[in-house]
Image: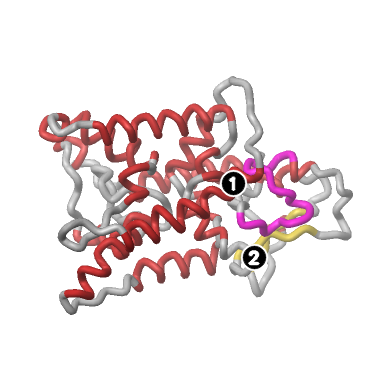
């Protein structure tokens, strides 16, 4: 599959680029590179030892968690750089980073290849990601305060399996001081990680489809982004091959720009009549001229 090979190369390259400060692994510490405050377009924890950027979901939670305190001391911060990053990426690419750049997406893609019974995810489960976004990322950090008037990063603390895999486990393994502080929360997060890893072996992209708040945010842009999917009705034989190949199980032939689409382009590869294509507004790029790898 031509696009699949190219996509896999992009996924590995992205993993290395957003975690480029490798010396931090030798020290068991979190790199403090000067440009680390800039958000990357994927779910990659700020606390990953070699991370060179900030996770937009973590940054967004941090903004809401500190907003009321900052306003109370006359230091309003509106977090425009976080919203701007998500808005810019979403407006141009939609949810494409989920399919081509996200390190945890790569993990899920790889482990789904492990032989096992494969389970369908009921459609209502996929709406949970919007609940996670609204409650864990927006409402709780803004509304639940401690005695100092500060909120917490609830999604990072209680759910994010990407952070546990890329930051929690490495830091606990490499840093004796952190190991001494391990308690209930770390055990909980490891349990959540194991749950999603096992689920992702049996159901393709389980975390992305049901829980990821960044995927939910970027998905809102799918129908209006410059990068879009298109089905040519003149070529389509309604064979549904594209639907069957889709890792997130959308009806590509009917709604190619569904908010769940991660723009992996498997549907383009699978269509025997080349009826499914991608286009970049305002100029459509012919399929024949694409470098397929």
Q: Is the magenta stretch mostly helix, strand or loop?
A: loop
Q: Residue at x 27, y 68 (%)?
A: 67
Name the secondary structure under disc 1.
Answer: helix
Of 21 and 249, the residue lying toward us: 249
Of 258 and 189, the residue lying toward us: 189
Q: Nearer the viewer, mark 2 or mark 1?
A: 1
Report the quarter where the C terminus lies.
Answer: top right
Counting other residues with Cα less than 10 Å from the Cα at mark 1, is it few (<14), some (14-19), or many (20 or more)?
many
**Residue of label 1:** 126
Report the quarter where the N terminus lies.
Answer: top right
| Earlier-in-chain disc, 2 versus 1 | 1
Corner quadrant of residue 270: top right
Q: Residue at x 52, y 30 (%)?
A: 199
Q: Tell whether 190 sits left or right of 11.
A: left
Q: In the rendering, at what x and y percent does residue 262 appear?
A: 58, 51
Q: In the rendering, at what x and y percent does residue 171 appear?
A: 22, 36
- Residue 223 numbered mark, or none: 2
Query: In the image, which residues are magenta?
Result: 244-259
**How far apart are the alpha carbons under marks 2 and 1?**
18 Å
Of 111 and 68, the residue lying toward us: 68
Q: From the viewer's perspective, is residue 136 above or below residue 180?
A: below
User: Quick check: is 247 in the magenta stretch?
Assistant: yes
Q: Tell whether 145 sits left or right of 230.
A: left
User: Quick check: is 284 in the magenta stretch?
Assistant: no
Q: From the viewer's perspective, is residue 183 above or below residue 46?
A: above
Corner quadrant of residue 80: bottom left
Q: In the rendering, at what x and y percent does residue 108 appear?
A: 50, 36
Q: Tell whether 161 sits left or right of 198.
A: left
Q: Check if mark 2's residue and mark 1's residue have beta carbons within 8 Å.
A: no
Q: Which residue is drawn at 33% across and 33% down?
A: 188
Q: In the rendering, at what x and y percent does residue 169 appear?
A: 28, 32
């Amino acid at each position: 599959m031509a696009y699949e090979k190219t996509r896999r190369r992009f996924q590995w390259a992205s993993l290395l680029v957003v975690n480029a400060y490798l010396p931090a692994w030798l020290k068991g510490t979190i790199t403090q590179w000067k440009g680390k405050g800039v958000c990357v377009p994927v779910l990659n924890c700020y606390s990953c030892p070699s991370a060179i950027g900030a996770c937009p979901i973590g940054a967004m939670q941090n903004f809401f968690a500190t907003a009321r305190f900052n306003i109370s001391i006359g230091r309003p911060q509106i977090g425009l750089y976080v919203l701007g990053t998500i808005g810019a990426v979403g407006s141009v690419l939609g949810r494409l980073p989920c399919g081509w750049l996200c390190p945890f997406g790569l993990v899920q893609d790889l482990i789904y290849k492990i032989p096992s019974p494969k389970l369908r995810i009921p459609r209502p489960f996929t709406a949970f990601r919007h609940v996670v976004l609204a409650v864990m990322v927006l409402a709780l950090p803004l509304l639940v305060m401690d005695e100092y008037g500060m909120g917490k990063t609830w999604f990072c603390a209680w759910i994010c399996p990407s952070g546990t895999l890329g930051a929690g486990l490495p830091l606990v393994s490499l840093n004796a001081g952190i190991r001494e502080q391990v308690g209930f929360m770390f055990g909980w997060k490891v349990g959540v990680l194991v749950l999603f890893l096992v689920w992702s072996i049996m159901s393709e992209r389980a975390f992305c489809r049901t829980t990821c708040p960044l995927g939910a945010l970027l998905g809102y842009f799918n129908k209006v982004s410059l990068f879009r999917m298109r089905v040519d009705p003149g070529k389509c034989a309604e064979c549904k091959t594209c639907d069957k190949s889709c890792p997130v199980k959308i009806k590509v032939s009917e709604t190619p720009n569904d908010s769940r689409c991660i723009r992996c382009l498997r549907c383009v590869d699978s269509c025997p009549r080349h009826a499914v294509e991608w286009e970049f507004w305002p100029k459509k790029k012919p399929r024949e001229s694409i470098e397929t790898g």
